[in-house]
Image (cartoon, helix red, strand yellow):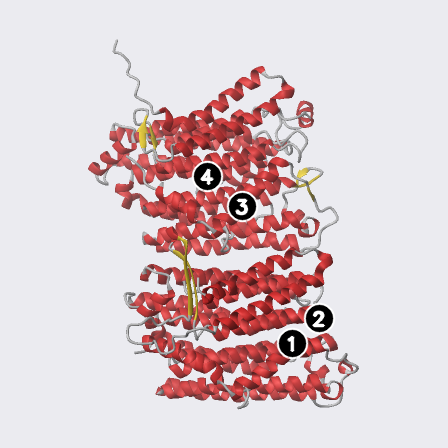
């Protein structure tokens, strides 16, 4: 095995083994177990960073070469008689998400070192975080449809447990709703995957993307795309299938919200690009307008609902609906610009919303309330928290120079560039949605940071060093991605071009 | 008088059968001649030794593909694989049946027919159980093995009765809740007798149609007759009723929840694992060897049956409040999933079906093993509300049961996923798209009752009188470990067993 292959297997195996090890430690070693988990999460980050090293095949996208050209690849037979393959690989589309997942998990583990929400038992929380990491990394690294589904499912139950055990007051309801929606999505996904596999005769994503739907009839492609898109739309989430998200986000503990918003939702958009668009492009072309209209609806509905929110975490949760709308709009245009916008939007949203949820959690833990009006005057009592919240909110609303800008601006650009009445309207409406986004985030800042100090925010405990260490990478990344978007875009451009060439000739 | 010619018999090929039946016969002699105090200590090792010997014999004849005893028995790939599965699952069942640590004297009483509630019945509840259960189990398992290898209708019927009758009796022997147990037994017996009658009537009609009992002969006759013959179709219909009853398929499933609930839990486990396997062994042979050539005619009806089974089983499971009834309905739904593999009518389907049966058997036995351990003063606490908060009281068993529930729900990396994948992809390969879609929807529905149990165990506050989990004896622990290892092993590395099933997937004759 080459170094790259070892790293690939390590990226999936390490969190899994780590989860078992951490969960298996006795209760009296709780803190030691959490430290162990954090060390493992750090090791996983190092492994995923290592994946970017080595020889990359930037320029090998020639005619006839596969559409997916992984930098590293492992292809082991898992169960021959079922045609199951343990096929992992990393390329420019997946690597940024892989790194983001590893980073956010590490930060969440670090955060859990410092504080564990009721009812305690932090080592189990850390173990579940690692289990979720294993599943998400597996989803991003799978180059086999069935394996993709397997990892997709692995994420579900640990996330359910995180919400149901460590969540807020209404956690049971939120957790059950999360499971119901996600299970329904899984059924659609597995039917869709079965349809594609049965029609194409292989479950290998490299082969499927290269064939680009050749040999699958138009009707089948449309049906498969509908199934797959619905499944991923539940996960992303796309309006009107989003209603599980605000509940889950609001009730989940801080680390749960961060993982959920930061990377879990990305499984949906990543799946849409790699699986749905990649394997049945005919269906994608047919249904792209529908997807685009829904994405614009999500942007507008998300922003309008945000304007009416009175609770901090819920507002951030709904803002995800809008932001993911931009990502989906980018995908729906089926153009290189749109996909690029979607991919950088994914990363930016993960960084910024991760930071926002960390901050919201910190504020709620201190003030014991999330109601916006009772958080007024935070700037006077805790300038650091207010300042960071302001920074994250401004990054989120898409100020040029910060990470949120590129994804939203280029999604709108891609829609207008696509031309025609439908796409132009979509682009214009999305731009209006962008303005609304700015409006609700500024409204949030006005209520929370300005005005006289409310009783809830007086005498807040100071921000600890652990918290600052946890937030610092996200703060830096939000700026870095805004100033040098090339660190993501240069990685994604080659595989995106190859994909677009195959999908939209 | 004409001289009677005995057909040549390949004794090596039927050695496994002979060993299991032999263990049963010796067991009867033990009952007659060994002092009462020693019987338990003799019977259990005897039966286990018999089963292990049968397993070894099966492995040594694994490459045989013969038709023997004048064509009455077909020792081919499926027969050997299913017999192997039966013996392996049988060993686990016997371990559960032999457990005497959890309940003083074991889960069985000596006499089935003493009127419930009378003095003599109360007396026997406090005495150690009878050891007749071991020979009965041996005969049941032997009958099931014969059923999987039967190559003509008469042998099949004999095998059906050989394995059914001991089961009827075993159902009535539960130490606790005697009345429920007797009711289960009577219900199972009466309905089982009806289904046997249907089966026999079907056999008669088919004989009238073809003039032969052997499946090969039937297939040839059916191919000639085309699809017009009334006798043939009535015969197939009647035969199917008998087979579907044993497999607990809708609409012949109504006995399942009552019998599963009333029977002693180790016997319930054996019925869910072994009887199901045997029934599908018979179904596979009848529909792939006997009537495969005229499948277009009977297929739509059986597809409807499979769909109804999957949906009814899943939907009814959602409403259950008793863990044994829940597992009963889930076993009905699982019969539907297995049937999709049968209806693929391909070697892939046969392999998937056989893999499913074995994988499911281990999981369901382990699940019932946990059920035997959750007890209060009145014996097993099977009502679901009594399981609330079990995760706090005994995290180990709650965790174990969670893994089993996840396997039932078909979560990846458990045998539940690989086996569903195997049958559904076989069905897709045969263009049974509707079946697969219904199957997936039904699995999603069925995931809820399982998850509900998990949620109940972990997230509900334990009540004052939450039952304790008894410490299992060696036998139950062993059964649990085997079940768990198989559940996870077949989920993570399904390759070897699947390959074995695939190599064994073609029938002879």
Could you tell me if the residues under marks 1 and 3 are in contact, i.e. CB atoms within 8 Å? no
Query: Where residue A356 sits in the image (x, y, percent)?
Result: 62, 79
**Residue wearing tag 2:** A114
Query: Where residue B438 sits in the image (x, y, percent)?
Result: 42, 54
In the drawing, does residue A249 fall left or right of residue B239?
right
Residue A237 visible to an observer of this rendering: no
> Disc 2 on helix, strand or loop?
helix
Could you tell me if the residues under marks 2 and 1 are in contact, i.e. CB atoms within 8 Å? yes
Residue B485 tag number: 3
Around disc 2, counting alpha carbons within 10 Å, would you say few (fewer than 14), some (14 to 19), or many (20 or more)?
some
Q: Nearer the viewer, residue B275 or B498?
A: B498
**Residue wearing tag 1:** A470
User: Label 3: chain?
Assistant: B
Could you tell me if the residues under marks 2 and 4 are in contact, i.e. CB atoms within 8 Å? no
Q: Is residue A64 above or below residue B220?
A: below
Query: Where residue A48 sits in the image (x, y, percent)?
Result: 52, 70
């Amino acid at each position: 095995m080459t170094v790259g292959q070892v790293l690939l297997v390590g990226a999936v195996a390490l969190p899994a083994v780590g989860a078992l090890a951490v969960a298996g430690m006795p209760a009296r070693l709780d803190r030691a177990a959490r430290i162990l988990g954090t060390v493992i999460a750090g090791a996983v980050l190092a492994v995923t960073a290592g994946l970017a090293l080595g020889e990359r095949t930037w320029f090998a996208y020639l005619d006839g070469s596969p559409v997916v050209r992984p930098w590293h690849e492992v292809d082991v037979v898992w169960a021959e008689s079922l045609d199951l393959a343990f096929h992992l690989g990393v390329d420019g589309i997946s690597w940024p998400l892989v790194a983001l997942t590893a980073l956010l998990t590490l930060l969440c583990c670090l955060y859990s070192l410092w504080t564990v929400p009721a009812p305690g038992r932090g080592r189990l929380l850390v173990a579940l975080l690692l289990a979720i990491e294993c599943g998400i990394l597996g989803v991003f690294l799978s180059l086999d449809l069935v394996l993709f589904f397997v990892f997709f499912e692995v994420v579900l139950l640990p996330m359910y447990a995180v919400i149901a055990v460590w969540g807020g007051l209404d956690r049971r309801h939120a957790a059950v709703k999360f499971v119901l929606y996600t299970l329904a999505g899984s059924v659609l996904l597995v039917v869709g995957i079965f349809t594609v596999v049965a029609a194409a005769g292989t479950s290998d994503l490299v082969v499927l993307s290269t064939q680009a739907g050749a040999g699958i009839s138009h009707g089948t492609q449309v049906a498969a795309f509908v199934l797959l898109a619905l499944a991923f739309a539940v996960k992303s989430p796309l309006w009107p299938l989003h209603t599980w998200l605000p509940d889950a986000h609001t009730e989940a503990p801080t680390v749960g919200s961060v993982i959920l918003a930061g990377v879990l939702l990305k499984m949906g958009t990543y799946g849409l690009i790699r699986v749905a668009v990649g394997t049945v492009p005919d269906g994608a072309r047919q249904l792209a307008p529908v997807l685009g209209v829904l994405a614009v609806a999500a942007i507008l509905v998300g922003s309008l609902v945000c304007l009416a929110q009175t609770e901090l975490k819920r507002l951030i949760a709904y803002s995800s609906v809008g932001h993911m709308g931009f990502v989906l709009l980018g995908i729906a245009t089926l153009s290189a610009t749109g996909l690029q916008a979607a991919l950088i939007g994914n990363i930016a949203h993960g960084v910024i919303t991760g930071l926002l949820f960390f901050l919201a959690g910190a504020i709620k833990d201190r003030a014991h309330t999330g109601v916006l009006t009772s958080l007024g005057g935070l700037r006077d009592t805790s300038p650091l928290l207010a300042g960071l919240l302001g920074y994250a909110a401004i990054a989120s609303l898409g100020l040029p120079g910060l990470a949120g800008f590129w994804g939203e601006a280029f999604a709108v650009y891609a829609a207008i560039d696509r031309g025609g009445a439908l796409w132009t309207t979509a682009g214009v409406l999305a731009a209006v949605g962008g303005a609304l986004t700015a409006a609700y985030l500024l409204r949030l800042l006005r209520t929370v940071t300005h005005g006289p100090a409310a009783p809830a925010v007086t005498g807040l405990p100071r921000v600890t060093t652990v918290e600052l260490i946890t937030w610092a990478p996200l703060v830096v990344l939000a700026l870095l991605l805004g100033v040098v978007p090339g660190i993501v875009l240069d990685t994604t451009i080659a595989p995106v071009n190859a994909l677009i060439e195959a999908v939209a000739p | 008088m004409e001289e009677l010619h005995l057909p040549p018999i390949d004794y090596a090929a039927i050695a496994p059968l002979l060993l299991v039946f032999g263990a049963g016969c010796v067991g009867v002699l033990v009952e007659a001649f060994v002092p009462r105090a020693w019987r338990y200590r003799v019977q259990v090792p005897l039966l286990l030794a018999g089963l292990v010997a049968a397993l070894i014999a099966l492995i040594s004849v694994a490459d045989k593909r013969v038709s023997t005893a004048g064509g009455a028995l077909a020792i081919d790939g499926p027969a050997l694989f299913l017999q192997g599965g039966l013996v392996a699952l049988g060993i686990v069942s016997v371990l559960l049946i032999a457990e005497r640590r959890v309940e003083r004297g074991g889960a069985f009483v000596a006499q089935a027919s003493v009127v419930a509630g009378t003095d003599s019945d109360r007396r026997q509840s406090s005495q150690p159980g009878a050891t007749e259960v071991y020979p009965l189990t041996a005969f049941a398992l032997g009958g099931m093995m014969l059923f999987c290898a039967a190559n003509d209708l008469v042998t099949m019927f004999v095998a059906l009765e050989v394995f059914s009758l001991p089961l009827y009796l075993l159902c009535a022997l539960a130490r606790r809740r005697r009345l429920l147990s007797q009711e289960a037994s009577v219900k199972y017996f009466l309905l089982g007798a009806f289904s046997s009658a249907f089966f026999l009537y079907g056999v008669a009609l088919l004989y009238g149609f073809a003039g032969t009992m052997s499946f090969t002969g039937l297939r040839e006759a059916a191919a000639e007759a085309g699809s017009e013959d009334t006798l043939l179709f009535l015969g197939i219909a009647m035969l199917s009723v008998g087979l579907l009853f044993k497999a607990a398929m809708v609409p012949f499933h109504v006995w399942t929840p009552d019998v599963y609930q009333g029977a002693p839990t180790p016997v319930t486990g054996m019925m869910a694992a072994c009887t199901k396997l045997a029934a599908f062994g018979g179904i596979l042979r009848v529909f792939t060897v006997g009537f495969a050539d005229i499948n277009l005619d009977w297929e739509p009806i059986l597809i409807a049956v499979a769909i109804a089974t999957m949906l009814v089983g899943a939907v009814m499971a959602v409403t259950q409040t008793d863990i044994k009834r829940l597992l009963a309905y889930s076993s009905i739904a699982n019969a539907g999933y297995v049937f999709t593999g049968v209806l693929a009518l391909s070697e892939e389907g046969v392999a998937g079906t056989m893999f499913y049966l074995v994988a499911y058997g281990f999981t369901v036995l382990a699940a019932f093993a946990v059920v035997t351990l959750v007890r209060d003063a009145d014996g097993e606490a099977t009502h679901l509300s009594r399981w609330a908060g079990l995760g706090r009281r005994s995290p180990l068993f709650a965790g174990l049961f969670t893994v089993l529930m996840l396997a039932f729900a078909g979560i990846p990396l458990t045998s539940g996923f690989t086996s569903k994948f195997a049958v559904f992809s076989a069905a897709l390969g045969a263009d049974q798209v509707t079946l697969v879609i219904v199957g997936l929807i039904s699995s999603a529905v069925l995931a809820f009752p399982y998850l509900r149990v998990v949620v109940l165990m972990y997230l509900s506050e334990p009540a004052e009188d939450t039952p304790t989990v008894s410490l299992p004896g060696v036998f139950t622990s062993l059964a649990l470990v085997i079940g768990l290892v198989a559940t996870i092993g077949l989920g993570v590395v399904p390759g070897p067993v699947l390959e074995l099933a695939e190599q064994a997937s073609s029938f002879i004759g």
